[in-house]
Image (cartoon, coloured by chain):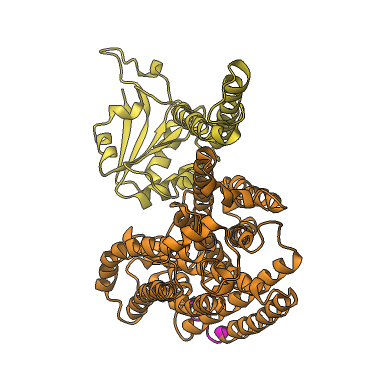
């Protein structure tokens, strides 16, 4: 503590706090990745000869991975304000840029469910999936909620709310960069609490609509929380990776320290366990009650090759990162933390594949082409995501310059070993 | 409050009425945690073994400044947690599948999903108990006597003052050198502990 000199808040702007030309490079790489990914996904999707049905499933998968990161970012920002957090100020702006991409992701999701809706959702009147008699009756009862027009309106509504929240927090935070006005922070303390309530409701409904209604006769009230757990852990990981990348490029070298990484690692660990807890809660209640209208969802995932994917998910998304991140030293080492931060989003992707793809092919696990289509679609949306975040950050600081708690965050210190 | 090393046992405390007060060490007082951390680094580097820092709340960076080793307790807790996990599994296997097999809602005698909640709880129980008692053990708590209790000023250690105690039963304790060190710490007050 004594031998280390901490940056003062007013020195932060000289710690390479502006992307200064780097955003052009990120946008360029992002655009190339987006074009290549889209071309790859379209080419592979077309080659499957199913009228692009697989392509739209891959599109949903790709969108949802980056949507998870952006939603995790929005949650992180609001939790910081609601808890009046101090340590995380130095990484908050990166989260704000991630969350600000929500309107862009909204356009992609909306395009997917409007153009590809009939391919994706078997409740859609234009769907060619042949439903059993009882399923037709059940879906008929749900028509008031599950119809294309209301569905599209809801998607627009969710993204309007998220986009408003994301830009509200980014806008006020940017305003504070020039004015240093403390009342802005105080106002955000107040607004973040109802913001979190609205976020929880919209995220739950969006998870029901976009993912759960892929199997329209299935229901699980905990499903929104399940998706949320994956959102937060993968966001923490992508935030870690972004900060490590930026510091490697010379940005914010002294502003972000191992102490901040350690805490991000703790949150990655916490939400890994939270996901395991929620996933097991959902599984066990279904398993124990043994009701056919619930168990079929798991049956599809335990047969025809999907059982291997389920084991991969259990071991890769829960057991390995849990055991790995348990140790303090591994969270305080940039190399091992980078490994964990790469691992977790990859397995969130595996989780989304597990949720989405058995609806495409429940009898037998999808083949390699489907896998690569989904990878290409993920690269496409990832390119769009990072390019938009960099475009929003153009000419602006990548750290809150005049946040009243910036000094606290710069001096932040976990118990050292 | 972190313990740097072994503290004197009750034997040093038994002050005989009327006898010469026994010399127990030095108590240095500080007004803020920063001064305490700086001073702790100095004492750490001077090589004293039997000393401690006292503060009303956990001070970030103090463990490092005191030169405390990484605790072994987390590993013991891990072992306890795994023991709880294994015992819970064994117990449920023995009860449900071996000693008194019973069909419950058509499930196999030994159904892992049904066992997991108990495995989780037993892991938490074993870890928690081990952590709590391990913490007491490694901090040598409860401790009913400590030389600093002879100081009136030390009562503020639970409200708004920070202290370092250098104790006389350190094998390398030298009264003169200890006095010099205590005075070099720039504390707001230096006190001789007697009792």
> Would residue A243 be seen by someone viewing this image from the given angle?
no
Q: Is residue B145 left or right of residue B89?
A: left
Does A370 appear above or below B177? below
- Chain identifier matching the yellow colour in the rendered picture: B
Q: Residue A139: x and y, percent? A: 47, 61
Q: How many marks?
A: 0
Give the residue displayed 62% in from the left and 46% down from the top.
Answer: A319
Q: Residue A219: x and y, percent? A: 47, 54
The stretch of residues the image draws in magenta is: A15-23
Give the residue displayed 42% in from the left and 66% down from the top.
Answer: A143
In terms of image quadrants, where is residue B11? top left
Q: Is residue A168 left or right of residue A106?
A: left
Q: Residue A258: x and y, percent? A: 53, 59
Which one is nearer the viewer's eye here, A228 or A414? A228
In terms of image quadrants, where is residue A7? bottom left
- State yes or no: residue A112 in magenta: no
Does A412 appear above or below B38? below
Q: Residue A251: x and y, percent? A: 54, 75
Which one is nearer the viewer's eye here, A369 or A31? A369
> Would residue B9 be seen by someone viewing this image from the given angle?
yes
Give the residue displayed 30% in from the left and 17% down from the top.
Answer: B20
Magenta stretch, overall SS: loop
Which one is nearer the viewer's eye here, A101 or A138? A138
- In the rendered structure, the colour chosen for chain A is orange
């Amino acid at each position: 503590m004594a031998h280390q000199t901490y940056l003062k808040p007013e020195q932060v702007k000289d710690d390479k706090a502006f992307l200064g030309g780097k955003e052009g490079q990120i946008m360029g790489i992002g655009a190339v990745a987006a074009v290549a990914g889209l071309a790859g996904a379209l080419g592979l999707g077309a080659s499957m000869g199913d009228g692009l049905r697989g392509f739209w499933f891959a599109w949903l998968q790709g969108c949802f991975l980056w949507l998870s990161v952006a939603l995790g970012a929005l949650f992180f920002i609001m939790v910081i304000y609601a808890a009046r957090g101090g340590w995380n100020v130095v990484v908050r702006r990166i989260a704000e840029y991630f969350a600000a991409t929500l309107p862009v992701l909204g356009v992609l999701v909306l395009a997917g469910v409007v153009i590809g809706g009939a391919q994706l959702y078997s409740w859609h009147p234009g769907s060619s999936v042949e439903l059993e008699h009882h399923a037709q009756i059940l879906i008929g009862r749900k028509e008031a909620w599950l119809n294309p027009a209301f569905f599209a309106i809801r998607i627009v509504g969710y993204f309007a709310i998220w986009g408003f929240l994301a830009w509200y927090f980014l806008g006020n935070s940017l305003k504070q960069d020039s004015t240093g006005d403390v009342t802005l922070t105080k106002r955000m303390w107040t607004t973040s609490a109802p913001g979190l309530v609205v976020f929880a409701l919209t995220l739950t409904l969006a998870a029901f609509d976009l993912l759960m209604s892929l199997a329209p006769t299935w229901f699980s009230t905990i499903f929104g929380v399940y998706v949320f757990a994956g959102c937060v852990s993968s966001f923490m990981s992508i935030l870690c990776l972004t900060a490590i990348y930026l510091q490697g490029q010379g940005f914010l070298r002294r502003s972000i320290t191992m102490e901040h990484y350690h805490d991000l690692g703790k949150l990655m660990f916490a939400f890994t366990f939270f996901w395991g807890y929620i996933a097991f809660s959902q599984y066990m209640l279904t398993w124990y009650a043994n009701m056919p209208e619930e168990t079929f969802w798991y049956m599809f995932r335990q047969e025809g090759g999907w059982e291997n994917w389920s084991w991969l998910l259990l071991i890769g998304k829960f057991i390995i990162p849990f055991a790995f991140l348990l140790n303090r030293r591994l969270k305080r080492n940039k190399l091992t933390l980078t490994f964990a931060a790469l691992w977790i989003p990859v397995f969130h992707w595996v989780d989304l594949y597990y949720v989405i793809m058995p609806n495409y092919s429940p009898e037998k696990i999808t083949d390699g082409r489907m896998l690569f289509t989904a990878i290409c679609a993920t690269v496409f949306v990832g390119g769009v995501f990072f390019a938009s975040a960099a475009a929003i950050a153009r000419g602006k600081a990548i750290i809150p310059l005049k946040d009243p708690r910036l000094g606290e965050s710069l001096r932040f210190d976990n118990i050292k070993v | 409050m972190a313990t740097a090393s072994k503290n004197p046992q009750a034997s040093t405390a038994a002050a005989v009425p009327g006898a010469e007060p026994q010399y127990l060490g030095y108590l240095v007082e500080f007004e803020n945690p920063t001064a305490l951390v700086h001073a702790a680094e100095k004492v750490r580097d001077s090589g004293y073994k039997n000393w401690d820092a006292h503060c009303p709340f956990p001070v970030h960076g103090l463990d490092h400044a005191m030169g405390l080793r990484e605790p072994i307790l987390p590993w013991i807790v891990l072992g306890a947690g795994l023991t709880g996990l294994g015992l819970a599994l064994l117990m449920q296997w023995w009860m449900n599948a071996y000693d008194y097999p019973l069909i419950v809602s058509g499930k196999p005698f030994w159904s892992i999903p049904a066992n997991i909640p108990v495995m989780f709880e037993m892991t938490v129980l074993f870890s928690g108990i081990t952590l709590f008692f391990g913490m007491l053990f490694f901090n040598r708590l409860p401790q009913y006597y400590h030389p600093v209790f002879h100081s009136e000023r030390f009562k503020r250690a639970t409200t708004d003052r920070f202290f370092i105690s250098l104790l006389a039963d350190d094998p390398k304790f030298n009264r003169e050198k200890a006095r010099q060190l205590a005075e070099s710490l720039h504390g707001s007050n230096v006190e001789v502990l007697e009792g």
